[in-house]
Amino acid sequence: MISEDYFDGKKKIHMLGIGGIGMCGIAEYLHRKGYEITGSDAVSSQNTRRLANTGVNISYGHAEDNLPEDTELVIYTSAVNPRNHELEKAKRLGIKQIKRAEALGNIVNDKFLIAVSGTHGKTTTASMIAKLLIDNKFDPDVFVGGNLDFLNDGTSRIGHGEYAVVEADEYDRSFHFLKPDIAVITNIESDHLDIYFDIDDIKNSFRKFLECGKKDLKIIACGDDQNIQDVIKKFKSKTTYGLGKKNDYTINEVTQTEKMVSFFLKNTELNIRVFGNYNILNASAAYLAGQELKIRQENFNLSMKTFSGAKRRLELKYENGIRIYDDYAHHPTEVRASLETLKKIFKKRIIVIFQPHLYSRTKEFYKEFGEAFSIADILMLAKIYPAREEMIEGVTSGLILNEFLKSGKEGYYFENSDVLMKELENICGSEDVIVFQGAGDITDMCDRFVIKIKNKTKDIVPL
């Protein structure tokens, strides 16, 4: 790893894939610290526009000319092609290059670090913990994988205390660069099989993450998950939570409404504004992390009273009879959790617009996706968002559609997003629940549809 003094003084840093959710937070953090940041990304996005507005110089497309020759450090995401022209130029010029995860570790490892890992729920759990610490004057550094209203829609925060809260990403084994004092594990499931061989490989990676922790590492983990039980059994200092009675802290007496969720964790009553069993689990982990810092129950409930969730985590974008949600869910387990929650609360027709993320994930899980979407009443599929991948022959959104149609429900696959939007406008009703799901640019489609609905609707009651 590079030394901490790489981030001391005025350093010129170039960032490849600067608009990525993990990169933009580091870019903004370093820029606000006074470093000269340049960067590039394939296309303009909300994140790159935000960075540009703060004064970061961003180029679009990847070309040698994007990299200033006086650059002293290049930070790049795991998604960047090793043959990227800017990386090749940096190698020629002898400029130091590190991955995003290594840069993050160098920023936070010297602090009291709370690192939140897991296949699902990382962003929300880390966000809850971050807000809890901010509200209770711990003044932490924060790095999460979602935009947060209490960070002015950013993904990072400069703290002036001795604490840091980060989302610990298992993709490309990135979390091995972190040295946590508290490690949270929300769940462990098969994913990123373009990186990992199988579930055993994934579990070994989580064990390595825990082994990277500091000497007195405290583990907070969901004991309902057998994969987690397998991973943590050799570690001594651990606390488990969950719905099962064998956990150290068992969840019970759950009450959910459209406005509030109340539940007991062991003998402690907790209240949150975000609904769904998965958020009850996330909140339980956040509360226990707060307990390690002696944060009281009433302070937790007060902090969560104003926690509305991370952007794109089943985020309500519009409500006026019709309800429109933007949801980052891109794995069958996440899809099912979101749709089950909506089905339980709203006795209305649910229309899902889903953009699969990655050819490899679609190939691996198309049957599970089809089964998860059977909760919805209508499914409308967009083309696969390839992100870092090349096309895999024979793998399209049609694989998911064919599985979904076995449920006997109404489903469609559209190669053209404009055609999809027009058809959605035709079939949606004034009382429908509409959910845009996926980790690609489906969020832009959601925003366009909200504008269409607003323009059509009289007496609008915006959020």
Image (tube, grey):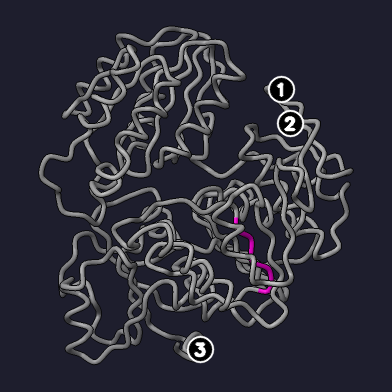
Identify which residue is drawn at 28% across, 87% down.
Answer: 70
**SS of the residue under disc 2:** strand
Q: Do callouts 2 and 1 mark residues in contact (Cβ within 8 Å)?
A: yes
2 or 3: mark nearer the eye: 2
Q: Amino acid at mark 3?
A: Gly
**SS of the residue under disc 1:** loop
Residue behind mark 2:
261
Q: Amino acid at mark 1?
A: Thr
Judged left or right of residue 262, residue 47 is left
Residue 132, magenta (yes or no)? no
Judged left or right of residue 445, residue 22 is right
Crowding at mark 1 (Cα within 10 Å: few <14, some 14-19, many 20+): few
3 or 1: mark nearer the eye: 1
Front position in the image: 239 or 316: 239
Q: Main secondary structure of the magenta part?
A: strand
Residue behind mark 3:
9
Q: Which residues are magenta?
A: 181-185
Q: Is residue 405 above or below residue 15?
A: above
Q: Quadrant of the N terminus?
A: bottom left
Looking at the picture, how far across and down is residue 50, in whole percent? 43, 54
Looking at the picture, how far across and down is residue 361, in whole percent? 30, 46
Gap between marks 2 and 3 measured at Cα: 47 Å
Q: Quadrant of residue 329?
A: top left
Looking at the picture, how far across and down is residue 362, in whole percent? 27, 42
Can you tell which mark lies on residue 257? 1
